[in-house]
Image (cartoon, coloured by chain):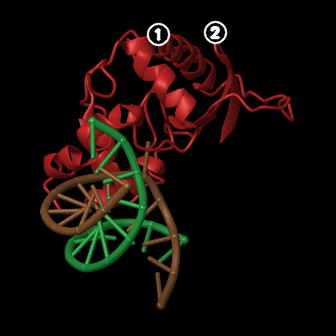
Chain colours: A red, B green, C brown
Amino acid sequence: MATALIQTADGTFTAHFSEYGLAGLHFPAGEAVPRPPTHEPSAPWNSWSRLTERALNQALAGKTPGPLPPLDLSSGTVFQRCVWNALRKIPSGVTRSYAQVARTIGRPEAVRAVGQACGANPIPVVIPCHRVLAAGGKLGGFSSGLDWKRKLLAREGAILELG
DNA sequence: AGTTCGGACCGTT
DNA sequence: AACGGTCCGAACT
């Protein structure tokens, strides 16, 4: 595994790469980053890092990102990967409810479990867990802070709340 | 219209 | 056994 710092207009994100691809992404930490990352020149990490930086900046700007590095979602359970996969199909600017996602994956009753799976999403922003709201257009929760959720949705031009 | 309460539901630790 | 990024209906203010 390698750690890379990803520079964006919103601060420095931290990315984790396995030998299979991007495995984790963290929002800018409040404090200074502990240690500088180490790179193995031979690995594809530098290439993936560049792809991640480009895609992440696009996403943060509310635009649909282009090519992504391979994603390593092996940390998740079958159910979680199922949910994350469904999340990736939600277009930018569009929102779904936890119940809708539950229906999409064929488990209409596993609503709370879907919420739980969203919280376990290892690659936020790229895997748009922020596009899932509570019923009635209410914001719902967000592991990394609701400010981020609001900000991301606003950048995409998503409609929030109700008139 | 907004709120609180109480069950019911399901995957993860 | 307990906890969640839930949902829905009912009964309030």
Q: Nearer the viewer, residue A1 or A100?
A: A100
Query: Amino acid type of disc 1?
Result: Gln
Question: First in sequence: mark 2 or mark 1?
Answer: 2
Question: In this rendering, does residue A117 appear at all?
Answer: no
Residue at position x 21%, y 49% in the image:
A99
The x and y percentages for residue A77 are 38, 60
Q: Nearer the viewer, residue A79 or A49?
A: A79
Are dots 2 and 1 in contact, CB under 8 Å? no
Q: Nearer the viewer, residue A21 or A58?
A: A58
Q: Relative to A29, say whether A142 is above or below.
A: below
Mark 2, Cα crowd under 10 Å, few <14 / some 14-19 / many 20+, is: few
Residue at position x 57%, y 15% in the image:
A53
Q: Nearer the viewer, residue A2 or A96?
A: A96
> On residue A9, which mark appears?
2
Residue at position x 14%, y 50% in the image:
A103
Q: Relative to C9, say whether A17 is above or below.
A: above
Mark 1, chain letter? A
Question: In this rendering, does residue A9 appear at all?
Answer: yes
Mark 2, chain letter? A
Left or right of A58, for residue C11: left
Mark 2: secondary structure: loop
Residue placed under numbered mark 1 in the picture: A58
Residue at position x 44%, y 35% in the image:
A71
Q: Relative to A145, say whether A98 is above or below.
A: below
Spatial separation of the CA atoms under disc 2 and disc 1: 10 Å
Q: Are marks 2 and 1 on the same chain?
A: yes
- The number of callouts visible is 2
Image quadrant occupied by the C terminus of chain A: top left
Left or right of A85, for residue A5: right
Mark 1: secondary structure: helix
Query: Amino acid type of disc 2?
Result: Ala
